[in-house]
Image: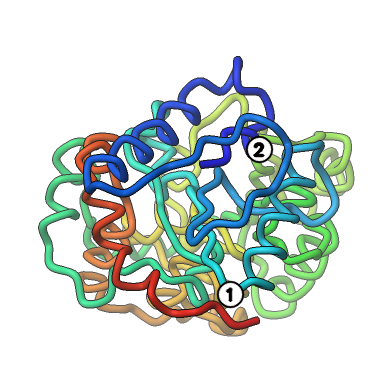
Amino acid sequence: MYFSSVANVRKHTRKIECLESFAQGVRATGHSVVTEWDHRYTPSRLAVMLGWATTNTGGRNIVLRKQIIADQRRLGNHTMCIDASCWKYLDDQGSYLRYSLNGPFYDRAEYANRNSTADKWQEISGALGVTLQAPQHNANGHILICMQRDGGFAMKTLSPVDWLQNKIHEIRSVTQRAIHIRPHPGKYNMQDFVAYSGRDAKRQSITLIDPSRSRLVDNLQNAHSAVFFNSSSSVAAACAGIPVFVDDSSCVAWQVANHDIARIETPAEFSREQWIYDLAAAHWSDTDARQGRIYQKFLPYLTATVTS
């Protein structure tokens, strides 16, 4: 258990709690746990850490994460990634978190959630008040583009601002519909988006949203569609019944998303039930962790050797 994978253990107490809960659950099954608070790597059958390795940012904890990932893979051992909830826009406390083996990407990592029943979705729906709304057809609505952090692993080394510029160009080649841009709320500089504010932007029907002054659910109100590269925010749009357009196959909403921006005016609709059951089953509470349910769910996958 790499507590040192957290940037600031005194500040991010919630992250430490989830690691401690998982360790308690492992011990409850009769297996041993080594807790690491220093920035050093120790070979193990399963290395558990917060998040994954960003591409070009971060401090000592990111350097450690990169070493853990590389050395565990080299030795044929597993690495567990604990990532934020896909419903974090409704869950500031992180009541539910995602757990996966050997990566955070939904199309590559093992989430042990295929063909899941409705049980976990019903639990999360009741706890967070989230539902699958009927498909929306807002004929006069705007296109919402949701941004991601620069340097975050989800962008796969791409520049979010470059991606935005290209995406607006693609959208404008097929529609003059109003575009609303929402920078990532966790890390952004409004100066990076100055080209999308002011009179020129208004003439192009482009509106820049300050994410500190509005919620994602508000930005989705009356939207015609929502556009993403690879973001868990796409789940909010999919749950709200807003047509989703996604570029990267690793996105959690890929299965229920459109992929060709040329169809922005005529988006397809998708069955979402099995998708939402599986996605919910990738999320776990601290109670699940402490009682060993997460560890036991992944145990069958730990017998295989990781290959690069």
Q: Given the image, on which type of amino acid does mark 2 rest?
A: Ile
Q: Residue furthest top?
A: 10
Task: Name the residue: 64% across, 71% down.
Answer: 75
Is mark 2 in CB contact (under 8 Å) with mark 1? no
Dot 2 or dot 1, earlier in sequence: 1
Relative depth, front residue between 83 and 65: 65
Q: Is residue 214 visible?
A: yes
Q: Given the image, on which type of amino acid does mark 1 rest?
A: Gly
Residue 57 at what x, y percent from top left?
Answer: 83, 45
Relative depth, front residue between 258 and 78: 78
Label at residue 91: none
Using the rendered view, name the quadrant where residue 73 is placed.
bottom right
Left or right of residue 32: residue 76: right
> Mark 1: few, some, or many residues within 10 Å (few <14, many ≥20)?
some
Q: CA distance from mark 2 to mark 1?
A: 45 Å
Q: Nearer the viewer, mark 2 or mark 1?
A: 1
Label at residue 209: 2
Using the rendered view, name the quadrant where residue 32 is placed.
top left
Which of the colour schemes (rainbow, by chain, secondary structure, one colour) is used? Answer: rainbow
Label 1 residue SS: loop
Residue 136 at what x, y percent from top left?
Answer: 32, 62
Residue on which the image places disc 1: 76
- Judge whether 240 appears above or below 62 on screen: below
Relative depth, front residue between 264 and 57: 57
Residue 9 at what x, y percent from top left?
Answer: 61, 22
**Quarter of the image with the C terminus in it:** bottom right
